[in-house]
Image (cartoon, rainbow, N blue to C red):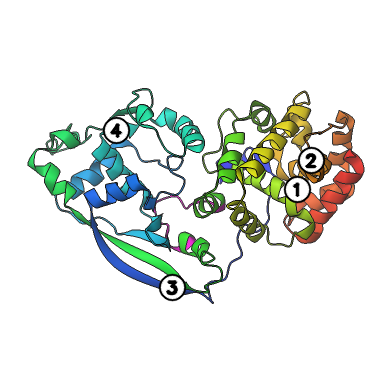
Amino acid sequence: MADQESWFEGDDSVIQDASFKDYQITATPNDFNVKTIVDFIDSGVVKIPGFQRNYVWDIERASRLIESLLMGLPIPQIFLYEQARNSFLVIDGQQRMMSIYYFVNGRFPRKDKRIQLRHIFAERGKIPTEVFEDDKYFAKFNLHLPEQTGKGASRFHDKNYSTLGDFKTALDLTVIRNIIIKQTAPTEDRDSSIFEIFNRLNTGGVNLTAQEIRASIYQSRFMTMLDKMTFNPVWRKFIHRTEPDINLKETEILLRSFAMLAEGSEYRDPMGLFLNSFAKKATTFSDEEVSYGEQLINGFFEALKDKPRTIFSATSRFRFNISIFEATFRVLCEKAFKEHSLKIRAPAESSFDELRSDEQFVQASRFATGQTANVKTRYERAKAILK
């Protein structure tokens, strides 16, 4: 969290406030071999949450996993969440599954290109074959198992999937235990338990953020569009970062701001559940609705492109303030949104100065920013000042 806190502020709301007491969950063990797992990923039966954007293993750690499988050693079981028939999300085991997938495909993602791969995936919905084969993005996946102190190098060192010989078939048939989890009640909201399940079972080193889970559960063209918007140069200027946040905090900010624009008058805390509800609704948005949303956000950035990056900073440290951005976006886009137009007019720079120093706005932005009363106060003060 320290890295994130270095660039943004104004968000101490409760991200998630879910209770686990009323859920009925089943957990069924299944054994899938390596070939089946790779086929499932290729076909989309198994979906990887935050595909590419959260793959953080280096090649040595991934190689040790493959070596364990080749040696017949057990590896931790993988948890899958069953969303529908032949549709599963990986809850715990993403790094393991992707390491296997990359090895079988003979390619390993270059560390300095993973942000770009995220962008490609956001636009294309997958990594195209020509990108997979491009050495600019991927290197050959030869197992990196060098000599250790007092031990010789592994017999699999520098091997790849195609040079394993007899071990290739053995690897294909190696069985990995999978636990398939399914929510059986309540039936009216089939995915409501998954945030709690993710938080309790995700043990892969770094817990997923609320937005990473949200983007995985409620995958949609709208969410992909928001992810793409984080590459807008005006947005990058305002948050003063060269690359998008890999934990999707920027996407969450844009989702929060758009949700407030669309349904802010009906907002009730906590913020996390409000965003979950809107993200779920966004899965039903038409291509036309997504396209308009993209044009509106771009129009907002275009209207403010000549403003200094500090207009969304509340303190002398010049950290991006989420509360200021959220209220500004809602107020400036409100009329255009109601009229389904793209007419957005930016106020004078002095108006932003006045908003940042307004006592009521400051108080409503200081603590419990997600409380209904504070959200309402910030909107009313921003509307009075920025209009």
Identify the secondary structure beneath mark 3.
Answer: strand
Res 261 label: 1
* Dot placed on the residue nearer the N-terminal end, 4 or 1: 4
Residue 116 visible here: yes
Alpha-carbon neighbours of circle 2 within 10 Å: few (<14), some, or many (≥20)?
many
Res 25 label: 3
C-alpha gap between disc 1 and disc 2: 7 Å
* Position of residue 381 measured from the top left corner of the image (x, y, whole percent): 88, 48
Res 333 label: 2
C-alpha gap between disc 4 and disc 1: 43 Å
C-alpha gap between disc 4 and disc 3: 37 Å
Identify the secondary structure beneath mark 4.
Answer: strand
Instruction: Name which quarter of the figure residue 272 lies in.
Output: bottom right
In the image, residue 112 lies in the stretch drawn in magenta: no
Identify the secondary structure beneath mark 1.
Answer: helix
- What stretch of residues is rendered in magenta? 199-210
C-alpha gap between disc 3 and disc 1: 35 Å
Q: Report if the CB atoms under discs 1 and 2 are less than 8 Å apart.
A: yes
Instruction: Name which quarter of the figure residue 126 lies in.
Output: top left
Query: Residue type at mark 2?
Result: Cys
* Dot placed on the residue nearer the N-terminal end, 3 or 1: 3
* Position of residue 191 measured from the top left corner of the image (x, y, whole percent): 51, 64
* Dot placed on the residue nearer the N-terminal end, 1 or 2: 1
C-alpha gap between disc 2 and disc 4: 44 Å
Residue 147 visible here: no
* Position of residue 38 measured from the top left corner of the image (x, y, whole percent): 28, 47
Query: Residue type at mark 4?
Result: Arg
In the image, residue 204 lies in the stretch drawn in magenta: yes
Query: Which residue is more in the foreground, 34 or 54?
Result: 34
Residue indicated by mark 4: 107
Quadrant containing the C terminus in the rendered view: top right
Label 4 vs label 1, nearer the camera: 1
